[in-house]
Image (cartoon, grey):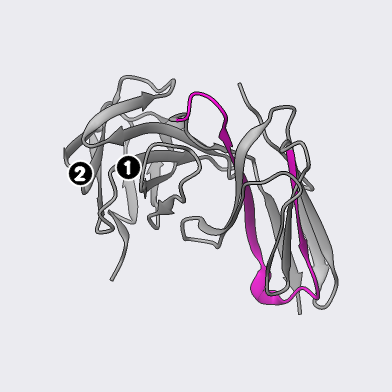
C-alpha cells in the first residue's frame, strides 16, 4: 500500500492556466506538507498543515493555495501558472509538527509550464 | 535563518571505493536526518541522529553527528551502484519546536560499476 500518494505524476500546462495537485496519506499522520524541488534539486518547504490547520506558509506567491479537506488529504491549487512554477512538487506527512519527526514523501508531481 | 551546507555537491566514484559527504551549519540542531532520493522518487529517510557525537551504522553507511550538533557526516564503505542517488541532510531547529525541517541542497552521488 502506498503511504503517501500524489496525482498527477506529470503535469504539462501553459502559462496562465490554473491547475491542482492532490495528495493523500494513509499513515494516520496529523501533519502534512508541500515542498517544491527546483531544477538544482533544492527542496524547500511551502506549506505545513496540522489537523487541517495551516501552520506554516513560507514566502510563496498567493497564487498557490493549499486546501486540507481532512487530515488525510492536502491539495495544492495553483492559479495563473508562470514559467518559474516549473518544478517537482512533493507532498509529505509526519506524525507531528516537530521537525524531528520522520517525513514520508510522495513520489512527486513534475509540473512543466510552457 | 538556519542553513545547511552540503559538500561535495557532486561525487562520481568507482564501485568499491569509500566516500564521505558532509553537512555543515553554524546553527545548532536538535536532531539531524539523512535522506536518499532516487530519480523520479521522493526522499526516503535513512537515519536520524539526535545526540552530539552520536554514530549510527546502517550496513555500509556510517552516520555521525558532530559533538556540537552543528554538523554531520555520512561515510559509505565499498560503494555500490545501488548507492547512487541524491543524499539530503535535514536539520530540526531547537526553537520553536514546530519549525519545519531545513534541508541542505544535497550531494548527488554516482557510483560507476
Q: Is residue A114 left or right of residue B19?
A: left
Q: Which residue is mark 1?
A: A32
Q: Which residue is mark 2?
A: A71
Badge 1 local density, few (<14 within 10 Å), some, or many (20+)? many
State the SS at label 2: loop
- Residue at (80% x, 77% y) in the render: B15
Badge 2 local density, few (<14 within 10 Å), some, or many (20+)? some
Q: Is residue B52 left or right of residue A60?
A: right
Using the rendered view, name the quadrant where residue A80 is placed: top left
- In this rendered view, identify the residue nearer to me: A43 or A101: A101
Question: Do we see residue B90 in this rendering?
Answer: no
- CB under 8 Å between callouts 2 and 1? yes
* Earlier-in-chain disc, 2 versus 1: 1
> How many labels, in total?
2
Instruction: Report x, y in % for residue A14.
Output: 32, 37
Q: CA distance from mark 2 to mark 1?
A: 8 Å
The residue stretch that appears in magenta: B71-97
Of all residues shown, which one is farthest toward the left?
A69
Question: Do we see residue A54 in this rendering?
Answer: yes
Amino acid at each position: 500500500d502506498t503511504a503517501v500518494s500524489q496525482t498527477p505524476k506529470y503535469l504539462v500546462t501553459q502559462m496562465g492556466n490554473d491547475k491542482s495537485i492532490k495528495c493523500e496519506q494513509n499513515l494516520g499522520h496529523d501533519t502534512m506538507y508541500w515542498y517544491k524541488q527546483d531544477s538544482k534539486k533544492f527542496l524547500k518547504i511551502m506549506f505545513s498543515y496540522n489537523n487541517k490547520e495551516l501552520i506554516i506558509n513560507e514566502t510563496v506567491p498567493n497564487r498557490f493555495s493549499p486546501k486540507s479537506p481532512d487530515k488525510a488529504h492536502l491539495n495544492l491549487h495553483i492559479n495563473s501558472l508562470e514559467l518559474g512554477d516549473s518544478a517537482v512538487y512533493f507532498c509529505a506527512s509526519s506524525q507531528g509538527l516537530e521537525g524531528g519527526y520522520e517525513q514520508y514523501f510522495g513520489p512527486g508531481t513534475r509540473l512543466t509550464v510552457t | 535563518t538556519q542553513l545547511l551546507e552540503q559538500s561535495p555537491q557532486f561525487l562520481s566514484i568507482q564501485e568499491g571505493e569509500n566516500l564521505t559527504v558532509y553537512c555543515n551549519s553554524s546553527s545548532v540542531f536538535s536532531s539531524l536526518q539523512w535522506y536518499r532520493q532516487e530519480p523520479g522518487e521522493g526522499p526516503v529517510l535513512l537515519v536520524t541522529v539526535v545526540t552530539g557525537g552520536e554514530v549510527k551504522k546502517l550496513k555500509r553507511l556510517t552516520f555521525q553527528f558532530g559533538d556540537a550538533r552543528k554538523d554531520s557526516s555520512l561515510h559509505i564503505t565499498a560503494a555500490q551502484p545501488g548507492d547512487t542517488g541524491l543524499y539530503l541532510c535535514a536539520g530540526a531547529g531547537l526553537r520553536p519546536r514546530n519549525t519545519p525541517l531545513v534541508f541542505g541542497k544535497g550531494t548527488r552521488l554516482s557510483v560507476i560499476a
